[in-house]
Amino acid sequence: MANRSAIDTIRGYFYQFDYSIKRLLELENENDTVVVEGIEDIDIKSATEETAVQCKYYSKTEYNHSVIGKPIRMMLTHFKSVKKGKNKKVNYHLYGYYKSGHEKLVNPITVTFLKETFLTYTKEKVKYKHHEILGFSEADLHDFLSLLHININAVDYDSQLDSVLKLLENQFNCSRFEAEHYYYNSALDVLRNLSIEEDIENRTITKKKFLKLINNQKILFNMLFIRYKGKKRYLKELRQHLFSTLNSSPFERFFVIQVPDENYDRVDLKELLMIISKKYSKLSKRESRPFCPYVCLYNMENQELIKLKNDLYNEGFKFKDGYDFQGAEFNPSSLIMEANYYNDVRLKVLSNYPQMELTLKLISKTKEIYQFYISNPLIKRKFENIKQINIQIEELTDIREVI
């Protein structure tokens, strides 16, 4: 029961973020703004008006007037500051999804219904009338109602998410996978960062800036996104979409791997290199165009790299690293020599970006780069005519679940 309750809470959290993303994408003017956690959950500002929206998701709850009574009273309190000239006039929206009970709310709402149903409440056996506390007249409440819009027939969680992903597909002319794993993933990260800012100015973002921030071609290890997906499902989807058919073509593939500072285990890395070699090499006698992958290991101490290579060598695992003899300088021409059945070279190992760049320049075949990073990617530039996939991971073992 507790677990189901936690899931419902998480979905409610995502529902609000998804609504914010949807409203940002739907803004007509690129300079229109959204404020996260402003007057309400989300404030939408255009050149002509401002709307404060309270957005809730109650998938297991029947609608009752008391559920929205407090938010309406808070809106009325804000309206009091507007009447006093302390704040600008805004529209007030209540937007919510409920399991049932929709027939209880009949529009249009009258002043009498507003006062008796939403503004009158009991606390610790004492009855309060919020409109009287604020000193509002009938005319004031009429004015408030003209700005209040209540929609308790909001779309469900899955329908709203589908709308968001379709908007992202159209905005970036991309596939559903890209919309979800690149842009939606990034959008959640942007919204989360905005929501924790203390200054309201820092929680404000234009449509133009939002689109710029989420327009990146990196798959982020965003904990919000992982909670939405589930890590196992997330890694499985990456594998199915990005790596399920890789070893069928004789391309020159570079796997760029950031070695973690903490919790590093040489055995894990060695096993990972062997898996990459096994999956992305073709060295049989019958293979007309044999190939094996390149691996660039960065953020790794030189002495540890030597120990790793020594382990591989002692286990009979053949690799090339571009050094032809003791004391030699790195030689990319030596590294790019064909791997085949006769030399049994199963992996080509690079230890830094300059080596990789020199090697890439010499290769005339089709090249692909798959970069796995924990904190910051090694390669930030975009190479022309080279497929590049950047995936943020939490630990080395994540890569084994993806490739």
Image (cartoon, rainbow, N blue to C red):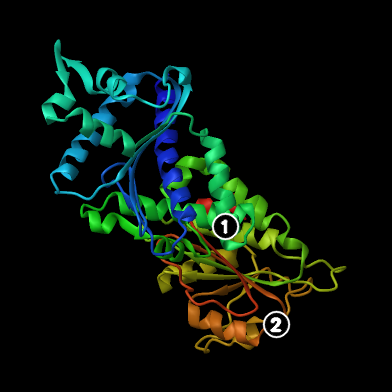
Rendering coords of residue 248 (x, y %): 77, 62
Rendering coords of residue 43 (x, y %): 33, 48
Q: Which mark is residue 337?
A: 2
Rendering coords of residue 146 (x, y %): 33, 37
Residue drawn at (58%, 82%) of the image: 322
Q: Quadrant of residue 388?
A: bottom right
Q: Tag 1's secondary structure?
A: helix
The amino acid pointed to by label 2 is Met
Q: Which mark is residue 272?
A: 1
Left or right: 380 with respect to 195? right
Image: 197 above or below 137: below
Rendering coords of residue 387 (x, y %): 63, 71
First in sequence: mark 2 vs mark 1: 1
Image: 188 above or below 322: above
The amino acid pointed to by label 1 is Leu
Q: Quadrant of the N terminus?
A: top left
111 or 375: nearer the viewer: 111
